[in-house]
Image: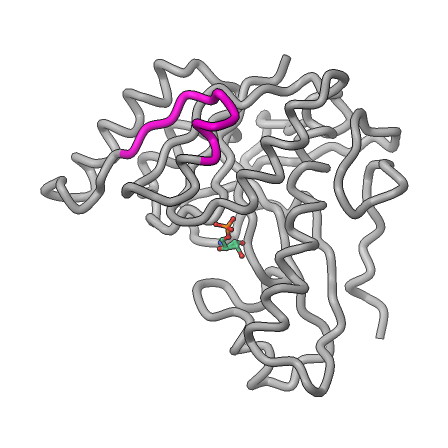
């Protein structure tokens, strides 16, 4: 059973997609705890699903190191294999990323390496980008920079606003994040940590369970970012 911690900062819709996915009987992954860096709205959804929750209010700590000490203590208590950042807005220090090397993954609302950082949807629209989307990647000390695990592109329509584009991207986020968890849980995806960089290794295969919005349940997912 793949043991997961999920870190959130707000509504936690990606967290909810992960909860729905991992609660299925045939999915060998379990969310052991959800931790927020503030009293986030999403915590109540996790608690309602019977998952251990905790708010570590970052604003009450003197500095990032003090906050991360407490965060690490709690993560260690949960004894997890993977830490999923799901709309977690605190930037983690290099030390923290190193401590959990190869164990932290993140979902980012852009086709990385395009649009690292914030306001990704508006930036794509302002640039008149044809394609936008989302990426799941391994977290390394450089922000939004670690090895990519999956991406899903959406076409940017002429009448899209940042809000409509965000909604389209978010529904793809809710598909690819559970897929990565399914692939990790079944061993179809693993990380080789032996080199200077983390190397993801993908094996094709059928994923367990049902992922909302996807009818094929195969891994790896098609990457359509190169279509024009
Ligand atoms: C998502 O677009 C996520 O990729 C980004 O922030 C948003 C949070 O969504 N980092 P939610 O909290 O999972 O609903």
Q: Quadrant of the N terminus?
A: top right
Residue 90 lies left or right of residue 167; in this view the side is left
What's the magenta region?
45-55
Task: Classify 52 as above or below 121.
Answer: above
Q: Is residue 33 above or below residue 135?
A: above
Residue under the point 55% across and 54% down: 108
Q: Where is residue 14 shown, x and y percent of the image?
A: 56, 44
Residue at x 82% of width, y 45% of height: 214
The x, y position of residue 5, in whole percent, is 47, 27
**Quarter of the rendering containing residue 141:** top left
Drawn side of residue 200 relative to residue 76, left or right: right
Residue 138 in the image, given as x and y percentages of width and height: 56, 41
Q: Residue at x 54, y 46 (%)?
A: 13
The C terminus is located in which quarter?
A: bottom right
Q: Residue furthest left?
A: 62
> From what the image shows, is residue 175 above or below residue 131?
above
Residue 134 point in image, percent of width and height:
64, 57
Q: Nearer the viewer, residue 207 or 211?
A: 211
- Any magenta on residue 150? no
């Amino acid at each position: 059973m793949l043991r997961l911690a999920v870190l959130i900062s707000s509504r936690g819709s990606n967290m909810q997609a992960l909860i729905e996915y991992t609660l299925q009987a045939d999915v060998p992954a379990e969310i052991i705890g959800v931790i927020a860096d503030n009293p986030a709205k999403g915590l109540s959804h996790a608690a309602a699903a019977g998952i251990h929750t905790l708010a570590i209010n970052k604003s009450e700590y003197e500095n990032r190191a003090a906050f991360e000490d407490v965060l690490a203590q709690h993560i260690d208590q949960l004894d997890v294999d993977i830490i999923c950042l799901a709309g977690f807005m605190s930037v983690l220090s290099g030390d923290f990323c190193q401590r959990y090397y190869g164990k932290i993954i993140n979902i980012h609302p852009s086709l990385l390496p395009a649009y690292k950082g914030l306001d990704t949807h508006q930036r794509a629209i302002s640039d008149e980008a044809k394609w936008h989307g989302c990426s799941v990647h391994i977290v390394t000390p450089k922000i939004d920079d670690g090895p990519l695990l999956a991406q899903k592109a959406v076409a940017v329509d002429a009448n899209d606003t940042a809000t409509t584009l965000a909604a389209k991207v978010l529904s793809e986020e809710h598909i690819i994040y559970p897929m990565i968890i399914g692939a990790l849980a079944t061993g179809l995806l693993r990380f080789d940590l032996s080199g200077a960089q983390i190397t993801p290794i993908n094996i094709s295969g059928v994923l367990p369970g049902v992922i909302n919005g996807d009818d094929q349940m195969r891994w790896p997912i098609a990457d359509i970012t190169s279509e024009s």
